[in-house]
Image: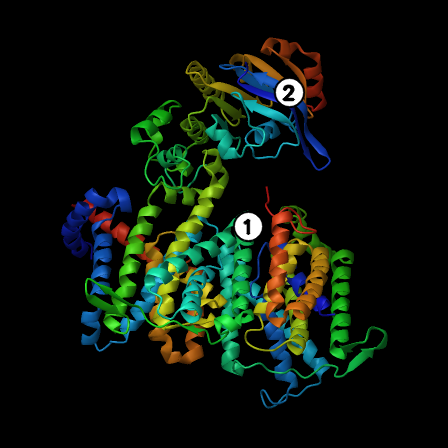
Amino acid sequence: MSSDTGRLGGPLNSIADGYNDRFGQVFGELNGLQFALIIGSLLVLLLVPVWAPLLGMSGLLRTLALASIWAILAMGWDIQSGYTGYISFGHAVLSGGAAYTTALLIGNVNPDLSLAVTLPLSVLAALTIGLVIAVPSLRLKGPYFSLVTFVAGLIFYQLTYAFSDYTGGELGVRVGRIDFTVGGFEITTFDPVMRYYVMLVPMLLIAVTLLYVARSNVGMIFVAIRENETAVSAAGIDTTKFKIWSFVLSSIPMGIGGWLLAHFYGTVNPLNFLLVDRSIELIAMAVVGGMSSILGPIGGAFLVIVLREEVLRIFGATGRWVMLWTLILLVLVFARDGLFRKLWHYLGRLGSRDGGEN
Amino acid sequence: MISAVYALIAIGFTMIFGVGGVLNLAHGALIMIGAYSFLVVTSGSTLGILSLPTGIGLIVAIAVAAAASYVLYIGLVEHIEENPVITFLATLVVALILSELFVMGFSSSPRTLINLVPGSIHVEQFGVRVTNIEVVGFVVSWIAIGLLWYYVTRTDEGRSILATSMSERGAQLTGVDLPKIKARTWLIAGAFAGLAGVFIGTLQSTSPIMWLDPLALAFIIVVIGGIGSIKGSIVAAYLIGYLETLTVELLGAGFRGTFSLLVLVIVLLVMPQGLFGREWVHE
Amino acid sequence: MSLFRLDGLTKRFGGLVAVDDLSFEVDRGEIVGLIGPNGSGKSTVFNCTMGRYKVSDGSIHFDGSEITDYRTHEVVENGLSRVSQESNPITEMPVAANIKLFTLPNSVLAFRGGATDEEIYQYAARIDLEDKLEEMPDELPHADIRRLEIAKALATEPEMLLLDEPFAGMNQQEINDLVDKFEELREEGITMIVVDHNMGGLMKLADRIVVIHNGSKIAEGSPEEIAENEAVKRAYLGSTEAM
């Protein structure tokens, strides 16, 4: 075993060192195995349209497109809740708010509005809602903050029914697909392959951006706020400002994710966007993957969505939810640091042992 | 009238928080368990066999919810309660699992509970009609609250619960068996939830999503009344009860919960410790 | 003009008066001892100064501006830093990162910046912690954790330090070393207020001592004068605590 990984680890480590020299300072250092995991996953994801049909799993394109969107949302939650320790239980409101903004613009203003209008306005809506929730509730700590954000989520859910003249209540609003041209080339989410990349590429860009933020001073201050807020203000840092900033940084991916999700489903309704379950699913993904790591929530999102949409279907429409929540509960009790964090640290130990031998 | 039932829900929620520092997000699910237990043993048609008298149904509902609450604590919460956020999340996941299980067992459409006491009284001088079940709900809730009050102030066992909710460390020093106290509190809170479940289930609805509204209500009441305070919960329950009635009459049923949130936000901004609360942040 | 001035500072908690109409001044370059029996209100004075408690009455001035209602980070930005009684390093980060945190700019857009490794080394070296930069805080002995707290405070480049019981839990050798360090810091131009509940470590260090009892000032003077002061002796006898 160790000689195997040793043989493998050697060249991998030297490639990883090339990366570390250039980007280690910015995104964090990796050993050979961790580097291989990242590059491997990236290749697998980029090449889904190639390998999935060969394996007779074309449906996977839809599932993984959905997983990409949820990965955006889980990362968006993580940079705020996972990093600062102010755990929000109402984050689906941010993405839901963005989705409903798109829906209301398309449904009630003009069905032909371009994404140059709907996307920025949707992100702005997520931002506004984020601040409306954050400013009063960030005065509270720990479970009290969680409780208030949870209630905020419930209220927005109820509002969609109260204003069902505009929101269509339970049925929701149709928004259609994404259609745009880049340099004369038409991109449309009617095509499953294009749709997949329309979801995957923003996910990867957001991942890189948030990793940069998380490994920067700002990320360090967020973690410090989580660990010891008093010490941070003693360092001359305005913790309130940074907590609100974490909400801002979170709102942007939440807005983009909500907008993508709206176009993915083609309909914006409370069930898929605002139901409490969605906020919890979001958190569950991040926790299952490993909170406050950005990469963990991506893994968690893909795991949860693949389970939900593919593996657990054998248990029936309701049974799959029972199974999914039960599995999540088990992870919460027995592996609360997250599965992907465990894997990551395992690779870290394995890789460094190789380094010692070389 | 319904406010007394709300108080019942909020008291159970706040007691668990007071004693163990746990926010039990499965509290609404216990209410649902109460309502469905009642349905199963009284309706005669649900499981095809049982059609017990409603009075016995009420007792079964209380017993099943209390047992479920106890099992929830011993089986899950006791092992994770040192991490409030994981507990928060885990109890919520439990609520979601139960909700899906009820969908599986009873479909997602609402059920009607057999009325404990059908009929209504016409109160001449106010020109309002009050249903018997509302009156019974009111009376039974107050009896339950009265019994609890007697228990925590007059009996040694009960007093140790009150002492623990004031200071966990202090109670430990005086030799209180903390795990036992906590388990007992969960039992009581579960019983209250089961009782409330029958009334909520009859007066509002019995469905797999019925856990959510009472839970939200419990939050709002408890935050306004001050977390951990039984007295505050009762006052706030009445405040919110009247506010709800008023909102529904003036703005329509769709806004039922929304207005309460407004009150919640105002309370948070003006007095973060609530009406009767201790400081939220332990120094 | 004095660098730091308390004017009739009062702090009430409900009915309890923790600090009662307290006034004193500290000149630039001075080391002032603030002593009093346990519960006399010393830490409350620091908490008020650092913006952790809201002041009930009176004012606090520092370096020409009124800082009474400043929030903690604003007080720190003004050049005041506190070494609190309890050590609270961030256990997930090594010593160097703990120091670096205290050098980060208070700007949400400053993704890079803060002290360089060399500067962090210098801050640590000022208090003899430069060999422990890579260690995690929970691996450090008590005296080093206390040093880390001082290094963090120094990293904010303060003009004045508030030291809350800096000698607590240290042996005589460690106290003597620390007293020497404080002397060096004073020579570098840092003003200090040192809180302690007895005068042991302060006799050599302090230029002047302010004694408070039940929140009020009962004496002020040189360490020698205070040691002879009858009111001070009574206050300490009353609280059955030896000087």
Looking at the rendered structure, the kind of residue marked 2 is Ser
Query: Which residue bears the numbered disc 1?
Result: A136
Query: Which residue bears the numbered disc 2?
Result: C23
- Counting from the top left corner in percent of width and height, residue A9 is at 17, 52
Q: Do the residues under discs 1 and 2 have CB atoms within 8 angstroms?
A: no
Residue at 63% x, 9% y: name it: C225
Residue A329 visible in this rendered orientation of the protein? no
- Counting from the top left corner in percent of width and height, residue C13 is at 68, 36
Residue B88 visible in this rendered orientation of the protein? yes
Image quadrant containing the N terminus of chain A: bottom left
Q: Quadrant of residue B191?
A: bottom right
- Counting from the top left corner in percent of width and height, residue A63 is at 31, 71
> Is residue A3 rendered to the left or right of residue B237?
left
Foreground disc of the pair 1, 2: 1
SS class of the residue under badge 1? helix
Residue at 63% x, 61% y: name it: B260
- Counting from the top left corner in percent of width and height, residue C217 is at 67, 20
Q: Quadrant of residue C123?
A: top left
Q: Residues within 10 Å of mark 2 (few under 14, many from 20)?
A: some
Of all chains, the one bearing label 2 is: C
Residue furthest to the right in view is: B125
Of all chains, the one bearing label 1 is: A
